[in-house]
Amino acid sequence: MQHRGHPQMSTPFTERPATERHVLPFGSIEVIAGCMFSGKTEELIRRLRRAQIAKQRVEIFKPGIDNRYSETEVVSHSQHRIASRIVQHSSEILAHAGEADVIGVDEAQFFDEGIVEVCEDLANQGKRVIVAGLDLDYRGKPFGPMPQLMAVAEYVTKTMAVCMKSGLPASRTQRMSQSHELVVVGHSDQYEARHRAYYDQPSEH
């Protein structure tokens, strides 16, 4: 005897045991941006240290042009430091990322435009990518690939310094020398953090 009732509906998805499911990795990009002396590198080091404490595999990179404090470490103005690898081109980061869970990149504004695609590629692999860099150059203009990195990032932290003229929060970097080169690597002898109201826009040449 046949029982009449609702026909059994077929579904396109059949639940499988968790051990058989393909689990997609959850990568992300975090950008720490601000002017000089705002604690960008210090915050980058803090996040990377926490990842190391959690026993995550960490790889850290910085551009070859940044040799102010060390050739082999990322160093903040307050002398916090962490071991790093110097690279000349963004593509080298992919080559050395290996099995790392967390990737740190300091002074990202000095990298070529390819750094954006590199960071996206790493995040799509499931890695946590943490990038620090200057958002504005000495002219007050968006610096290198930083605008694109901030646009594609899941998380953006804007850090503020203390204006050396007023004590107000500072978001600009004032170059004290007369050089009109876009990149002049230096520290407090050549640059000051300034509030918008105390920032002197350099003339264009």
Image (cartoon, grey):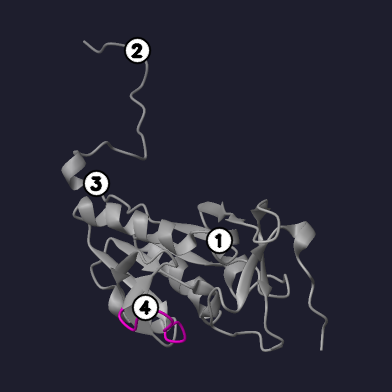
Q: Which residue is mark 3?
A: 21
Tell me how far mark 1 sits from mark 4, CA to CA: 20 Å
Identify which amino acid the numbered label 4 is placed on. Answer: Ile
Mark drawn on residue 42:
none
User: Which element carries disc 3, helix, strand or loop?
Assistant: loop
Q: Residue at x 35, y 80 (%)?
A: 70
* Residue 71 found in image quarter: bottom left
Work out how far the residue at label 3 is from the one at label 1, CA to CA, in angstroms.
38 Å
Mark 4 sits on what residue?
93
Closer to the chain start, of discs 2 and 4, is 2
Mark 2, secondary structure of its residue: loop
- Contact check, label 2 and label 4, Cβ < 8 Å: no
Q: Residue at x 59, y 85 (%)?
A: 184
Nearer to us: label 3 or label 1 = 1
Q: Are marks 3 and 4 in contact (CB under 8 Å)?
A: no
What are the residue bounds of the magenta stretch?
64-72
Disc 2 or 3, which lies upstream in sequence?
2
Identify the main secondary structure in magenta: loop
**Which amino acid, mark 2?**
Gly
Which numbered disc covers residue 33? 1
What distance separates the C-alpha of mark 1 from that of mark 2?
Answer: 63 Å
In whole angstroms, how far apart are the C-alphas of marks 2 and 4?
62 Å
Closer to the camera: disc 2 or disc 3?
3
Q: Residue under label 2, please give it.
A: 5
